[in-house]
Image (cartoon, rainbow, N blue to C red):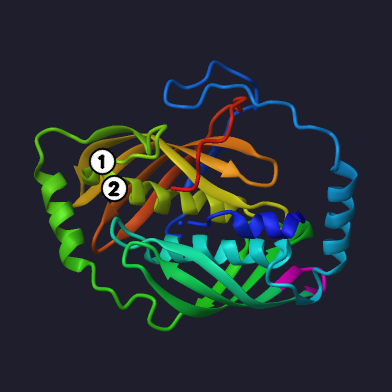
């Protein structure tokens, strides 16, 4: 089975301000109690030459009209998902890539590679799907950094979530006991219904990291909220300290990040701090939930 088809089978799920970013050295440490502390098995070596040949072949295809099912188009389209979550995501609104309809790529002088995409995006909680036109530029050279995204998605925001968001905000703004939750989802893929809004919030916050870290050679998915802790409310903003696990689908690495973020219905999600935690050897959690 080709690499492109494998990627299509992966279930794809979800920037305000300038968050500070900290990276710790990638040294092996004792696994976090909420992580998956199993050692990754060494991959079998057969078939590696075939994968290398396929990747080289698809590199040649990455300029001009793209096969929507191959990784250059899929990875660029996934960036649009993260972009939409950072702009419009909430505890009751979460976006996922449904499919790539068509794509085109071109080199832009010394700036990088630009992808023009027609995609189908699903608002996962409301279970609605809309077509989007998007442009993704992966910078190169001295200007290398986070992808630059523009997207137009018609009626993607037509579901009104204001009442639900205000009810949740008021409930947790006045609670005497601050929220604390772990393992969303747990090892069986279960999430308590009362915790689903905070799982969604963790996914939205993680999109800030995935958008920033995405390149033409990565494909990120949110794996788990290892823990989330509510802090004291400030200026009507609910504030959270959160430890998330990201699954980098190409390398099969599980990458740990610590986030500090705020949320309110009026202000949306704002990530204040991002810190990449030390590398751990683990098996990927089930990311199909």
**Which image quadrant for residue 110?**
bottom right
At mark 2, the secondary structure is: helix
At mark 1, the secondary structure is: loop
User: Which image quadrant: the N terminus?
Assistant: bottom right
The answer to whether residue 51 is seen in the rendering is yes
Give the labeled residue for mark 2: 196
| Front position in the image: 188 or 146 | 188
Whole-number angstrom distance, CA of label 2 to CA of label 1:
7 Å
Q: Residue at x 88, y 49 (%)?
A: 50
- Give percent across and percent down for residue 172: 15, 45
Is residue 112 part of the magenta span, yes or no? Answer: yes
Q: Residue at x 29, y 47 (%)?
A: 196
Mark 1 crowd level (few <14, some 14–19, many ≥20, 10 Å Cα): few
- Give percent across and percent down for residue 40: 65, 26
The answer to whether residue 145 is seen in the rendering is no
**Which image quadrant for residue 189?**
top left
Q: Residue at x 82, y 63 (%)?
A: 58
Span colored in magenta: 107-114
Q: Residue at x 55, y 56 (%)?
A: 211
Mark 2 crowd level (few <14, some 14–19, many ≥20, 10 Å Cα): some
Task: Determine whether label 2 and label 1 are within 8 Å by CB.
Answer: yes
- Give percent across and percent down for residue 96: 47, 62
Q: Main secondary structure of the magenta part?
A: strand
Which-is-in-front pick, marks 2 and 1? Answer: 1
**Which image quadrant for residue 135?**
bottom right
Residue that protrudes farthest toward the bottom in the picture = 154
Report the disc number at residue 192.
1
Q: Give above or below for 122 relative to 152.
A: above
């Amino acid at each position: 089975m080709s690499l492109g088809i494998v990627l299509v089978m992966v279930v794809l799920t979800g920037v305000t301000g300038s968050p500070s970013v900290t990276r710790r050295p990638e040294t092996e440490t004792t696994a976090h109690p909420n992580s998956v502390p199993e050692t990754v098995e060494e991959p079998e070596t057969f078939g590696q030459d075939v994968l290398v040949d396929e990747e080289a072949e698809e590199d040649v295809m990455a300029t001009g009209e793209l096969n929507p099912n191959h990784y250059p188009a899929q990875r660029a389209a996934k960036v649009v998902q993260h972009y939409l979550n950072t702009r419009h995501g909430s505890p009751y609104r979460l976006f996922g890539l449904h499919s790539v309809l068509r794509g085109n790529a071109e080199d832009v002088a010394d700036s990088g590679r630009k992808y023009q995409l027609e995609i189908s995006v699903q608002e996962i909680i409301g279970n609605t799907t809309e077509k989007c036109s998007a442009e993704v530029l992966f910078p190169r050279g001295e200007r290398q950094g986070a992808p630059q995204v523009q997207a137009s998605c018609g009626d993607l925001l037509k579901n009104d979530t204001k009442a639900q968001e205000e009810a949740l905000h008021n409930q947790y703004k006045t609670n005497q006991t601050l929220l604390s939750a772990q393992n969303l989802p747990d090892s069986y893929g279960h999430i308590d219904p009362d915790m689903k809004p905070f799982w969604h919030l963790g996914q939205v916050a993680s999109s800030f990291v995935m958008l920033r870290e995405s390149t033409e050679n990565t494909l990120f998915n949110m794996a788990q909220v290892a823990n989330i802790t509510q802090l004291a409310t400030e200026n009507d903003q609910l504030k959270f300290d959160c430890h998330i696990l990201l699954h980098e689908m190409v390398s099969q690495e599980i990458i740990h990040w610590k986030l500090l973020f705020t949320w309110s219905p009026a202000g949306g999600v704002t990530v204040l701090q991002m810190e990449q935690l030390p590398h751990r050897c683990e098996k990927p959690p089930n990311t199909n939930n």
